[in-house]
């Protein structure tokens, strides 16, 4: 029977993270058991040049002192490996330059220095790993053997990873490699990202474009972008030997814990009877929070009592925005910001708000749209292709070049009591996370089988 090895390295080591990709990986992995009758799905991670089968994605002690200490040790071990490897990367680059290229003695001295520098990390690395083995009573992952007919699905965020040589070795042994692509924003919109991420992501995509046998995006919009980018890098003939597909994400908030309560300030705000418009996302440039402030400031100047609420952790390149929010005269009156809500509290906000407003410049999918709409919360969103793919006529779209466009829609909705979308939200439905996992697995299996049965392979665009 076909085996899919579903990679989840980052989430395995960072169970406390709950942003978009981590939420996707965790939900897909947690729903794999329901698919085992159709295909064997094995969660895996890479560690120390080996592939390990995951028996338990999150630690029983994930939230206590023991769990935090273990994660700190794991992070230390990874950093030691990265720093040690960096010396050899520098060594490899120096060998191509003068005087290393011209002098054997210079090359020899440099090698010895790199060897000494590398060795200085060996003892603390071994000590850290020994402590980890001793403190983890029930290991969550065990080394496994791959088979030549396995398919490795790189589901997690892997552009910062160091397992590329291992993946290449597995591929030489016959393992098929499939890459899940969430977006190409560092390539298409680098102005919204940190400089180092742009460079790392570009190198990663160059590697994945040359290595992967197939690509699965999280929307048809991104699938088409990936196809175009791979064709640009490899040429039409080589790109034609790869396949390109997509799947859609689920909608449940899986970390809702009935034992946790909604904090007082959140409950007070959302039971105030005011019309509250939510923005749910990490606070970073491409999410376009400033646009929302511009639009709602126009409404407030007109005397409207509508409330704007930002929900999400503080990200990068946002200093001016955060300062603007903290110094805003409407802060804690008509403008609110919560940076650390639990899933219980987010569920509560979705259930008590008037609408979700989502002005992103660019997205791979837009998970908050699905989360909101699945709970009956209507959505106003920027007029970009992927939102039309997800929301269709059930979303009200506004013009990103004109904040007044959103202000008019909010005013219209408040004055008439009618949401300005072409169709009512009650007629909309979406996938569960189990459906999403099943869609991913079925499409990967189908594409891999098709590729193996027919050479050369023609790219197939799968229907919904």
Image (cartoon, grey):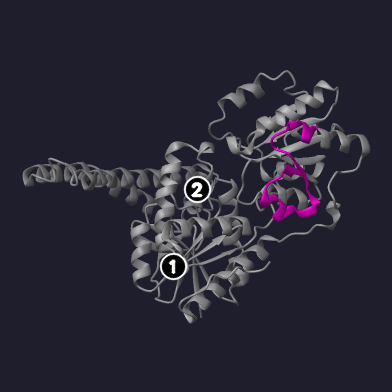
Q: Nearer the viewer, residue 262 or 328?
A: 328
Outermost residue toward the front in this view: 236
Residue name at image x 87 percent, y 33 percent: 273
User: Residue at 54% of width from left, 37% of height from top?
Assistant: 192
Numbered tag placed on residue 279 in the rendering: none
Nearest to N terminus: mark 1 or mark 2: 2
Nearer to us of marks 1 and 2 is 1
Residue extending furthest toward the right: 416
Residue range (magenta): 380-407
For residue 14, the mark is 2
Q: Is residue 188 left or right of residue 306?
A: left
Question: What is the count of numbered marks?
Answer: 2
Look at the picture and state if 31 lies above or below 302.
Answer: below
Label 2 environment density (alpha carbons within 10 Å; few <14, some 14–19, many ≥20): some
Label 2: element kind? loop
Image coords of residue 446 (percent x, y): 56, 75
> Which residue position is annotated with label 1?
237
């Amino acid at each position: 029977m076909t085996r899919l090895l579903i990679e989840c390295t980052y989430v395995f080591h960072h169970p406390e993270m709950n942003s978009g990709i981590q939420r996707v990986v965790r939900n897909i992995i947690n729903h794999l058991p329901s698919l085992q009758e159709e295909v064997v799905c094995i969660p895996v991670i890479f560690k120390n040049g080996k592939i390990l089968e995951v028996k338990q994605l999150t630690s029983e002690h994930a939230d206590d002192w023991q769990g935090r200490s273990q994660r700190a040790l794991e992070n230390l071990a990874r950093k030691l490996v990265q720093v040690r490897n960096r010396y050899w990367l520098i060594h490899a680059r120096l060998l191509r330059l003068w005087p290393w290229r011209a002098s054997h003695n210079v090359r020899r001295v440099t090698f010895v220095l790199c060897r000494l520098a590398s060795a200085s990390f060996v003892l603390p690395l071994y000590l850290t790993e020994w402590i980890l083995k001793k403190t983890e009573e029930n290991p969550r992952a065990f080394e496994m053997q791959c088979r030549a007919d396995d398919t490795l699905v790189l589901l997690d965020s892997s552009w910062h990873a160091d397992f590329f040589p291992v993946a290449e070795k597995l591929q030489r042994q016959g393992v098929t490699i499939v890459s899940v692509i969430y977006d190409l924003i560092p390539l298409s919109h680098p102005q919204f990202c940190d400089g180092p991420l742009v460079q790392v992501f570009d190198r990663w995509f160059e590697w994945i474009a040359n290595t992967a046998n197939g690509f699965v995006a999280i929307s048809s919009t991104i699938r088409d972008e990936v196809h175009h980018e791979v064709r640009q890098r490899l040429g039409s003939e080589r790109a034609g030997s790869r396949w390109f597909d997509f799947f859609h994400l689920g909608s449940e908030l899986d970390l809702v814990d009935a034992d946790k309560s909604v904090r007082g300030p959140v409950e007070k705000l959302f039971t105030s009877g005011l019309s509250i418009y939510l923005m749910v996302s990490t606070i970073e440039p491409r999410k376009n929070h400033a646009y929302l402030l511009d639009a709602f400031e126009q409404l407030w100047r007109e005397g409207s009592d509508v409330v704007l609420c930002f929900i999400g952790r503080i990200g990068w390149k946002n200093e001016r925005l955060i300062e603007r929010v903290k110094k805003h005269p409407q802060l804690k009156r008509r403008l609110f910001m919560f940076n650390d809500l639990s899933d219980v509290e987010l569920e509560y906000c979705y259930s008590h708000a008037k609408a979700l407003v989502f002005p992103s410049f660019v997205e791979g999918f837009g998970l908050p749209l699905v989360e909101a709409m699945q709970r009956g919360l209507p959505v106003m969103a920027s007029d970009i292709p992927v939102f039309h793919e997800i929301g269709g006529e059930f979303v009200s779209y506004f013009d990103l070049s004109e904040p007044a466009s959103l202000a008019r829609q909010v005013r219209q909705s408040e004055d008439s009591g009618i949401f300005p979308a072409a169709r009512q939200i009650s007629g909309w439905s979406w996938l569960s996370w189990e459906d999403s996992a099943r869609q991913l697995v079925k499409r990967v299996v189908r594409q891999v089988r098709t590729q193996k049965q027919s050479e050369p392979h023609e790219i197939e665009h799968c229907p919904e």
